[in-house]
Amino acid sequence: MIIPRLDRIAYGGDYNPEQWPPEVWPQDVRLMRAAGVNLVTVGVFSWAELEPRPDEYEFGWLDEVLELLHGNGIAVDLATPTAAPPAWLAHRHPGSRLVDRDGRVLGFGARQGFCPSSPDYRARAAAIAERLATRYAGHPGLVLWHVHNEYGGANPACYCPVSAAAFRVWLDRRYGDLAELNAAWGTTFWGQRYSDWAEIEPPRRTPTAGNPAQQLDFLRFSADEHLTNFRAERDILRRYSPGVPVTTNLMIPACKTMDYWRWAGEVDVVSNDHYLRAESADNHIELAMAADLTRGVAGQSPWLLMEHSTSAVNWQPRNIAKRAGELRRNSLTHLARGADGLLFFQWRAARFGQEKFHSAMLPHGGTDTGIWREVTALGSALGALAQVRGTPVAADVSMVWDWESWWAVELDWRPSVDLDYLERVTACYAWLWRAHLTVDFTPPGGDLSGYPLVIVPSLYLLHADAAANLADYVRGGGTLVVSYFSGIVDANDAVHPGGHPGPLRELLGLVVEEFRPLRAGETVRLDGGTTGDVWTELVRPRGATPVLRYLDGPAAGEPAVTRHPFGAGVAWYVSTRLRGEDLDAVLRPACGDAAIAPRDDLPAGLEVVRRGPFLFAINHTDQDAKLPAAGTELLTGGHCAGLLRVPAGEVRVIRTE
């Protein structure tokens, strides 16, 4: 159980009573009960209400809210409000303000406008966290602590003098002496050698491309500063309430700058915020990928969906409302893929502020709205699905994901501006989704032994131990698919010696002699009618067998896709960008090597996921769908004797026999 004191699937959302007069609060609680809400997050942005002036605290309103919620059977996820420091902190401690890469001090009036390294911010954040902990640690309604909000979302890095000094301390711990740092950063290039720690600055705006190793280390440092801040508040909360789990809401995969593999072991519950890319026709596939990646960060264990939306958000270029039934499909997809709780931002739609046009469980229009009816229907349905809670998701394949490689591949002056980490992962994931294969995400050095097929969509930055892990996997009988521009550099963005793809050469049975990226809009033809774009390479097999060759383009006649038996397994390599059905030419035969059969018998657009003994069938089309299944249907109470019918746009969940 991710929340020991909650015996149901968590259902609710962010509750901001401070935005409403007290006479509204009893109505809120009454409607929460009607909707089936059993958990709300309170206090996320309430620092200025709780501490209106330094060391002057006003907890009376929060006392009243917590008593009202607890008295009505609604549990509390109590937040520390440290993502929104009050105006007095910025005014009294101007050195705590966020400074961007161009040296501009950013103004007050948003959120997360603070320097993560600021000692003034850290002291005040610890103080408000401790006040909350001492006051509410024993409250019977408290079931979860929620630290901060979306670390690094608006302030991933700060370039102020305080951050510069903290960066130098971090570098000293990492390297020990300047000689090691100079070697790691390759400072003999362009005469960048440092002779004193005081000479080192954050990677501020430079006349041309800055040192990539310095940029990578600054990304690591900045992520570490946020993690340090989380740990400080978490440890205070644990000290006062050791039995209450502590979490913070991650942003997977939207947040590029936090390495969430490192956060996984720091939180008691992995929780995530996810919002649809509204204008994408297949955004339900990206949603499934985000849920699978969140489960991966949770170690393939259950997790908590801390935020998603009932309908439109307010911060995308065009905020498209969800269609009827989409709220239900989105929510139950997260449940199918490992979530043990479904929470929204927010409970009641705000009347003012930056997010007043963001959808909510209780819209501006009140209870006589389609959103409200869908919210209450979902709350009712979750009661019938309670037995799903805590069960594991059954995966068919693994995909390797690495935040540091994402950072590195998209730094300055790569061979092509079209190198896009998230695009490669999404393209491979979408093919697997359409083949009805469920994915577990793992880090490059993670345990791959249980998977017949592992896909590496992009791994530009590759550590030697991770390369050895991939080789051991294939040697032991696994099937591996590696995409282009992988295995190129080490942790310092230095090219691996001996030629490309570095430590993957022996495993893949080839050498990449030269990168040959394509012009904008240019495509290349491969054998069998397959088309690639963006990228090609001059591949020289050293034991690998060419499977497809280029028919034209800068690598015409040369291998485009290779297959290499290695130990008891097989390693595939793809040297161009393939998308959609063009990926069939690689992933179908790779599935064959792995003895995995894509479910071509299932209808297109029907998402099928197994979680423990439960089968989720989510129909994203406007046509009824059928699939072979037998068992008890949990949402309708019926029995399926061998063929399950899933109406258009609907969801069915059966306990299989």
Image (cartoon, rainbow, N blue to C red):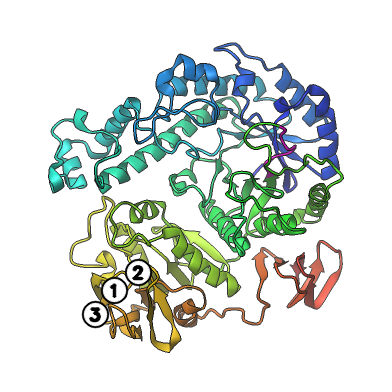
Question: Which numbered tag is attached to residue 542?
Answer: 3
Type of amino acid under label 2: Tyr
Type of amino acid under label 3: Arg
Q: Residues within 10 Å of mark 1 (few under 14, many from 20)?
A: many
The magenta stretch is 344-351
Q: Nearer the viewer, mark 3 or mark 1?
A: 1
Determine the secondary structure under disc 1: strand
Q: Residues within 10 Å of mark 2 (few under 14, many from 20)?
A: many
Q: Is residue 242 above or below residue 210?
A: above
Q: If you read the primary sequence from the N terminus, does the residue marked by circle 3 or circle 1 appear first?
A: 1
Q: Is residue 82 above or below residue 156?
A: above
Left or right for 128, reference 24: left
CB under 8 Å between discs 1 and 2? yes
Q: Is residue 12 above or below residue 58?
A: below
The residue pinned by badge 2 equals 484
CB under 8 Å between discs 3 and 1? no
Q: If you read the primary sequence from the N terminus, does the residue marked by circle 3 or circle 2 appear first?
A: 2
The CA span between labels 3 and 2 is: 17 Å
- Tell me residue 274's x, y (percent): 60, 49
The residue pinned by badge 1 equals 537
Q: Main secondary structure of the magenta part?
A: loop
